[in-house]
């Protein structure tokens, strides 16, 4: 009974401290700043895990050794995938923000012989409980596919593979659309969708998220999708 009361009180304390200008995680108080929580620190960051601002990019960044990552074995219908997760804590005076957990796929790290990974944050796009605004450079080293409802088989074999243009991934749909038409969509990591936990719906990477929806603003015969994996951000251009 005492243990149960302790955990209830701990939960209340965490909620209360998250609402202040400092964040308290298991008795560790964080001053205002942007912190990385990941497997090395058990999602309890310290000043060693601070992101710093890169003026040339206009983003906050932190680079970590891949040897610091611990991977979870995830069983997806009998197929095993190894993923390591991180999240960003933005501690500030007008309310703290914690991102959703973002996966790193071990296969991508090993296939590219990566010794370090850089993680990025755009504070102007970050939202509580979402991946938007945060990401890493491994996401540029794997394939991604835009899947959705604009055609008969476009969720599956006719999904469009993104093409890399610098730090942006681009997919173009050629079809006649009318203003206010809608497209349901997700971004998948492989033609067969797995690992399901890497599926991105514009807000989170998850095997259980809702489809995202885009509403056309005008009549057009070409819709371009731009995916910025380093900050988990999607934008659309109607031609």
Image (cartoon, rainbow, N blue to C red):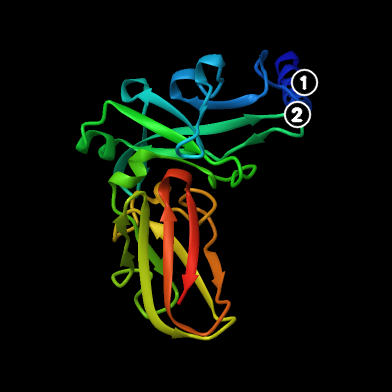
| Residue beneath the point at 41% across and 48% down | 229
| Residue beneath the point at 56% across and 26% down | 35
Q: What element carries label 1?
A: helix
Asked whether residue 69 is in view, the answer is no
Query: Of marks 1 and 2, which one's residue comes earlier in the chain?
Result: 1
Q: Is residue 28 above or below residue 176?
A: above
Q: Give the CA distance from mark 1 to mark 2.
A: 24 Å
Q: Based on the displayed image, in which of its 4 quarters is residue 67 positioned? A: top left
Front position in the image: 25 or 215: 215
Image coords of residue 27 (percent x, y):
67, 13
Q: Mark 1 points at which residue?
A: 9
| Residue beneath the point at 59% across and 40% down | 123
Please, which residue is most extreme toward the front here? 56
Image coords of residue 215 (percent x, y):
57, 74
Asked whether residue 160 is in view, the answer is yes
Report crowding for label 2: few under 14, some 14 to 19, many 20 or more residues within 10 A (C-alpha).
Answer: few
Report crowding for label 1: few under 14, some 14 to 19, many 20 or more residues within 10 A (C-alpha).
Answer: few
Does residue 200 appear left or right of residue 94 in this picture? left
| Residue beneath the point at 58% across and 77% down | 217
Image coords of residue 238 (percent x, y):
48, 74
Q: Is mark 2 on a helix, strand or loop?
A: loop
The circle drawn on residue 93 is 2
Which image quarter is the N terminus in? Answer: top right
């Amino acid at each position: 009974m005492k243990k149960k009361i302790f955990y209830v009180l701990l939960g209340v304390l965490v909620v209360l401290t998250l609402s202040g200008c400092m964040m308290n995680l298991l008795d560790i108080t964080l001053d205002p700043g942007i912190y990385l929580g990941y497997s090395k620190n058990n999602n309890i960051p310290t000043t060693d895990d601070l992101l710093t601002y890169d003026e040339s990019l206009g983003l906050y960044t932190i680079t970590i050794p891949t040897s610091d990552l611990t991977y979870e074995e995830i069983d997806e219908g009998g197929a095993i995938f190894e993923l390591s997760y991180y999240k960003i804590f933005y501690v500030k005076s007008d309310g703290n923000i914690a991102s959703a957990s973002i996966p790193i796929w071990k296969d991508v790290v090993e296939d590219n012989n990566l010794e370090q990974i850089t993680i990025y944050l755009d504070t102007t796009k970050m939202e509580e409980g979402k991946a938007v605004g945060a990401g890493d450079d491994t996401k540029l080293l794997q394939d991604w596919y835009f899947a959705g409802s604009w055609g008969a088989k476009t969720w599956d074999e006719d999904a469009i593979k993104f093409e890399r243009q610098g730090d942006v991934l681009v997919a173009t749909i050629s079809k006649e659309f009318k203003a206010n038409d809608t497209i349901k969509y997700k971004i998948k990591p492989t033609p067969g969708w797995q690992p399901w936990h890497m599926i991105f719906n514009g807000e989170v990477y998850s095997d259980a998220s809702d489809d995202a929806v885009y509403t056309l603003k005008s009549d057009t015969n070409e819709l371009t999708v731009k995916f910025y994996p380093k900050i988990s951000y999607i934008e659309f251009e109607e031609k």
